[in-house]
Image (spheres, rainbow, N blue to C red):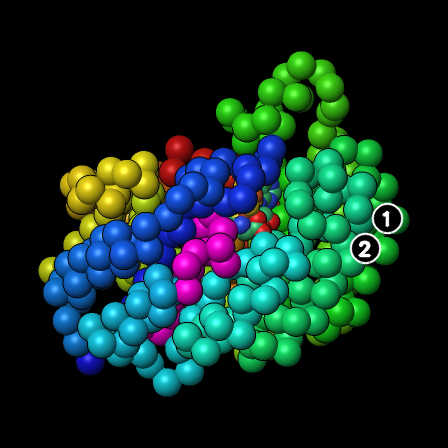
Amino acid sequence: MNKPLGVYVHWPYCARICPYCDFNVYKNRAIDADAWIAALTRDLEKYAARTPGQKLTSLYFGGGTPSLAPLPVIESVIDTCAHLWGFEGGAEITLEANPTDAEQSRFDGFASAGVNRLSLGVQSLRDDALKFLGRDHDAESAKRAIEAAQAAFPRITFDLIYGRPGQPLQDWRDELSEALALGAPHLSLYQLTIEPGTAFAKAVDKGRWTPPEDDVTADMYEAAQEMTAGAGLPAYEISNHAKPGEESRHNLVYWTYGDYVGVGPGAHGRLTENGARIATETPLAPKDYLDGAPHMETTLSASEATIERLSMGLRLRNGIPFTEADAFFTEAGSYERLDRLIGDGLLAWDGDLLVATDDGRRILNRILYELFA
Ligand SMILES: C[S@@+](CC[C@H](N)C(=O)[O-])C[C@H]1O[C@@H](n2cnc3c(N)ncnc32)[C@H](O)[C@@H]1O
Ligand code: SF4
């Protein structure tokens, strides 16, 4: 029996494009459900042939806004995955949804199709912030969506974005405590990132507003750590908080550097074949994807795979298995670099597990830069 596998399905359409978002997204247009079913089935079959004997631990519909995808597309992907691989007991099937009223009416259909975990992009429980973030829902419809999701699915999670310009620390604390009171067993709390090429990047460049200083967002991050832990949903990853047992199995496949298949436009995958790590990437444009344009495929070098594995694993509060036999130590100067970061209190290593400390996790990019300098 091989190790478990995840499948990521990218649905690239959204009702509108949010000004902060740099995902591979396109404004909704007429969708030919049959063409999508054919293209997704084609690729699932192709990757299933390369992963024989593996069962799925997780299937994840991300986007874009997969809660706007035609129900037959979702049903077809779930049935095809069941037929090609089969699901492990307790497998997680997640779908990302925007919390508009229109989408809530579709929850029961997704649940009947087999979706057992809903991830809602709430982003904020403040109407003015939702407006600033360009969202087409308000705080009340977000709360209604959370309630409807709790009734329709065994597991739910929702996303919030903090570190908005002018957001006072106390207001973030109040918002987060309202969010925790809603009783979801998992929360993703993201610091607003100004991504190059987005409408927000242009606004910041033109001086229309300024993102908060690092010390302000550091205090918000700390408040989130303390409040979620106090509420029984401690951080298990930099931005993710869960009741024990409610962690996202899908994201754990990424963070533990497991194998996953990526289908849909611009989806990434990682497979292990004959001991080598293979990176796959599908064409970005929906039309190219539907037309069957070739996927990119690269065999990662041992050091590229090590960089990826550490970049992923050090995000986890519990760190990753790491011994002196690790390929990392074949690089010149690696012991010294590791020692320096341990001496600075940013990493901890007991010979079996490597962990970024609480201080280290917040500045993970610096750690990775120094580890692989
Ligand atoms: C792929 S998006 C999709 C979710 C869904 N389409 C929605 O918007 O509700 C996943 C999450 O990433 C977060 N996100 C996207 N861009 C971000 C940014 N620039 N800064 C912080 N968080 C961001 C949002 O919280 C969003 O819910
Ligand atoms: S945040 Fe969600 S709804 Fe907004 S553009 Fe990105 S994927 Fe689409």
Instruction: Kindly tell me whether residue 263 is visible in this rendering.
Output: no
Q: Residue at x 74, y 39 (%)?
A: 131
Numbered badge on residue 175: 2
Residue picked out by circle 1 = 171
Residue at the limit of the structure toward the bottom, as seen here? 89
Secondary structure under the numbered disc 2 in the rendered image: helix
Numbered badge on residue 319: none
- Name the kind of residue labelled 1 in the image: Asp
Picture quadrant of ligand 2: top right
Q: What is the quadrant of residue 87 in the picture?
A: bottom left
Circle 1 Cα neighbour tier, 10 Å, few/some/many (<14 / 14–19 / ≥20)? few
Q: Residue at x 43, y 41 (%)?
A: 29
Residue 33 x, y percent position in the rendering: 33, 55
Label 1–label 2 contact, CB within 8 A: yes
Q: What is the quadrant of residue 134 in the picture?
A: top right
Residue at the limit of the structure toward the right, as seen here? 170
Instruction: Kindly tell me whether residue 278 is visible in this rendering.
Output: yes
Count of numbered circles on the image:
2
Q: 57 left or right of 327?
A: right
- Name the kind of residue labelled 2 in the image: Glu
Measure the C-alpha gap from mark 1 to mark 2. 6 Å
Q: What is the quadrant of residue 142 in the picture?
A: bottom right
Residue 197 x, y percent position in the rendering: 51, 25
The boundaries of the magenta stretch are 55-71
Q: Is residue 185 above or below residue 299?
A: below
Circle 2 Cα neighbour tier, 10 Å, few/some/many (<14 / 14–19 / ≥20)? some
Q: In which quarter of the image is the C terminus?
A: top left
Residue 97 x, y percent position in the rendering: 55, 58
Secondary structure under the numbered disc 1 in the rendered image: helix
| Residue 180 among magenta residues | no
